[in-house]
Image (tube, helix red, strand yellow):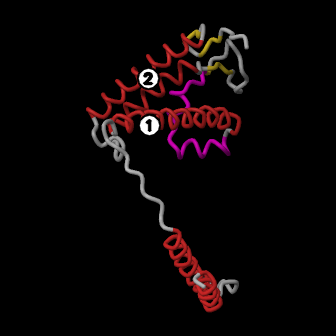
Amino acid sequence: MKATKTTVAFATVQSFKDAAYQSAVSGERTASIARYVLDNCPTFLDDVPKEIKAQLDEGFALRWQELNPAKKYTVDYVPSDTGNIEVSLAFCMSYSQQAFGQMKNEDPVKHSLIKDVRDRFNKYRSNRLADLKTAVRRIANEGKTSKRDQAKLYDKWLEDTFDTMKARAKTATARGDDTANEVRLRVAIDAFWKAYNA
């Protein structure tokens, strides 16, 4: 298999050796960032204070705008290199949720353009925040040994399953679901145990 040279957003990868090296450096950089976040906001995984969230949003927005430069439009919102309306992330996010919602009826073309930018940024921000939380979680769990729960004994699993079935039948009956029958279920479970333990 012949390796090809690939250019990624901001890195040129020359070989698998280079990919491994760059991946290692990237991982170390991410760990360093995660350590900073955890040191300065110990509650980051459970509760992010508003002021820190605002700073994170600003940082994500800065990078998103670098990757997605603003586009120019005419006053009718037709794409144009010489247009005098610049649709940037800041422009799109400057509208309150209420003003943005009203725009759907008042100016549907403008609303559509702004919605596209807002939706793409919100997805980007959500994904980057999830990446950061994953890295912070990894740092927070350094040195901890994970304890794996032993699998339940089969008999215990059966008992728990039947208990769940009984509870769901009771709830369904209370809701008026006539397909659930608690008495028939109890008889069927008793018959199962009698056959199983024979």
**Residue 55 falls in image quadrant:** top left
> Can see residue 35?
yes
The residue pinned by badge 2 equals 27
Q: Which mark is drawn over residue 179? A: none
Residue 97 drawn in magenta: yes
**Residue 49 falls in image quadrant:** top left
Q: Residue at x 60, y 33 (%)?
A: 120
Q: In the image, is residue 71 above or below residue 35?
A: above
Return the x and y of residue 160 as percentages of the image width and height: 51, 74
Q: Secondary structure at mark 2?
A: helix
Q: Residue at x 54, y 27 (%)?
A: 89
Mark-to-mark CA distance, 1 and 2: 12 Å
The mark tally for this picture is 2
The crowd level at tag 2 (other Cα within 10 Å; few <14, some 14-19, many 20+) is: few
Q: Looking at the picture, which amino acid does disc 1 mark?
A: Thr
Where the N terminus falls, by quadrant?
Answer: top right
Q: Secondary structure at mark 1?
A: helix
Where the C terminus falls, by quadrant?
Answer: bottom right
Please provide the residue range marked out in magenta.
86-106
Q: Residue at x 59, y 21 (%)?
A: 68
> Can see residue 49?
no
Q: Which mark is drawn over residue 134? A: 1
Q: In the image, is residue 102 above or below residue 159?
A: above
